[in-house]
Amino acid sequence: MRVGELARATGLTVRTLHYYDEIGLLSPGQRSSGGHRLYNGEDIQRLYRICLLRRLGVPLEQIARALDDPAWSLGAAVHRHLDEVDRQVAAAHRLRSGLQGMVDTLGVDGPLDAQAMLRKACTGTSCRCSASVPVASSGVPTEPSCMPKWKPATG
């Protein structure tokens, strides 16, 4: 089966299949005399396992190890992935809490208090803002110590 046919049959793009070949995840079993990729039954079975693991959210690096290491455990990989998803969900909840604090502050009548808004945004997050956020003479808050320093790209 040629790469275009495999792409149409699986719903993947030709570019994805080329990338999988480039990184050694799915190399075609043969090449035509013209250099075209030709996939055999074993290649298609490997691609099926790749697609299954991708749907579970397993990163490509782990998939490569999984398919090439007979000692690899699907259960252990799923547990590791579940731990990572739990960390991402917790981070999303912290972000939502901060955004809700900003929405609550913006909904208040009267002038916008940037310090209060930043304090509310940091409530319940891992942010370590001090109670007083430095404010420039323009009234705009400067970067609190918890914020990463932004540097413009040079070049």
Image (cartoon, helix red, strand yellow):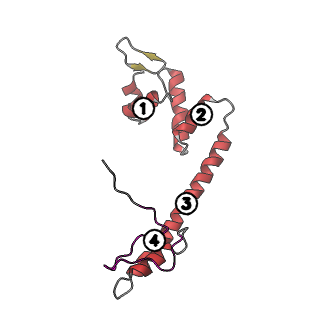
Query: Given the image, on which type of amino acid does mark 2 rest?
Result: Arg
Image point (44%, 33%), residue name: 10
What is the crowding at mark 3: few (fewer than 14 residues within 10 Å), some, or many (at least 20)? Answer: few
- Give the farthest residue toward the top: 33
Residue that numbered label 3 is attached to? 89
Label 4 sits on residue: 144
The residue lying at 54 percent from left, 22 percent from top is 42
- Identified at 67% across, 43% down, the residue is 76
Say which of 12 and 76 sits in front. 76
Q: In the figure, 132 relative to 93: above or below? A: below
Where residue 74 sits in the image (x, y, percent)? 65, 39
Q: Residue at x 39, y 22 (%)?
A: 2
The answer to which of 55 and 136 lies nearer the viewer is 136
Bounds of the magenta segment: 128-149
Cα gap from disc 4 to disc 1, whole angstroms: 42 Å
Q: CA distance from mark 2 to mark 1?
A: 17 Å
Residue of label 2: 65
Residue 12 highlighted magenta (yes or no): no
Q: Which of 43/149 is in front?
A: 149
Amino acid under disc 1:
Tyr
- Rendered location of residue 140, percent (x, y): 34, 76
Label 2 element class: helix
Q: Which residue is mark 1?
A: 19
Amino acid, disc 4? Pro
Amino acid of disc 3:
Val
Pointer 4 with pointer 2, Cβ within 8 A: no
The earlier-in-sequence mark between 3 and 4 is 3
